[in-house]
Image: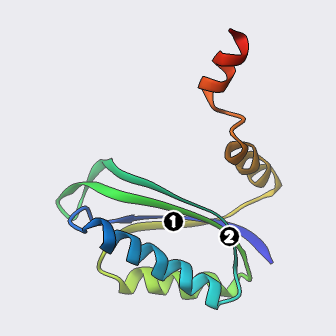
Amino acid sequence: MKNYETVFILTPVLSDDQMKDAASKFKKVLTEGGAKIINEESWGLKKLAYPIQHKKTGFYHLVEFEAEPTLIDTLETEYRRDEKVMRFLTTALDKHAIAYNEKRRSGAFNKKKEEEVAS
């Protein structure tokens, strides 16, 4: 099993419930394929760097998981089939990326906490 991270951007015309349903659909594809979900983050509506499908914003969602490499093709096929997905990117994580993500999840990079400690 390898560690992966996938980020997908959903179209901004979705309601909050539709956005959550789409994210849970992709999570279900992963769990049914035997993946272990490590972390999931919904970054909300963000401005895009350039228009995609004539839209300037999109709902960003990140999922970090551990799975067999064959599951990635299944996941990306589901992304391509779903018209709500504007873009997606799945990357394999090396040991340095895994360590970085663990630190990020634990809050090691929060500036507010560092400022409180310094006070």
Please tell me whether mark 1 sits on a helix, a strand or a loop: strand
- Disc sitting over residue 65 in the figure: 2
Q: Quadrant of the C terminus?
A: top right
* 113 horizontally vs 90: left or right: right
The residue singled out by tag 1 in the image is 89
- Disc sitting over residue 14 in the figure: none
Q: Nearer the viewer, residue 68 or 60?
A: 60
Task: Classify mark 1: residues with Cα within 10 Å, few (<14), some (14-19) or many (20+).
Answer: few
Q: Nearer the viewer, residue 119 or 76?
A: 119
Q: Position of residue 54 (x, y in %)?
A: 17, 60
Q: Position of residue 97 (x, y in %)?
A: 74, 51
* 53 horizontally vs 32: left or right: left
Label 1, label 2: how many angstroms apart (C-alpha)? 14 Å
Q: Position of residue 23 (x, y in %)?
A: 45, 73
Please tell me whether mark 2 sits on a helix, a strand or a loop: strand
* 59 horizontally vs 71: left or right: left
Task: Classify mark 2: residues with Cα within 10 Å, few (<14), some (14-19) or many (20+).
Answer: many
* Residue 31 falls in image quadrant: bottom right
Q: Position of residue 105 (x, y in %)?
A: 68, 48
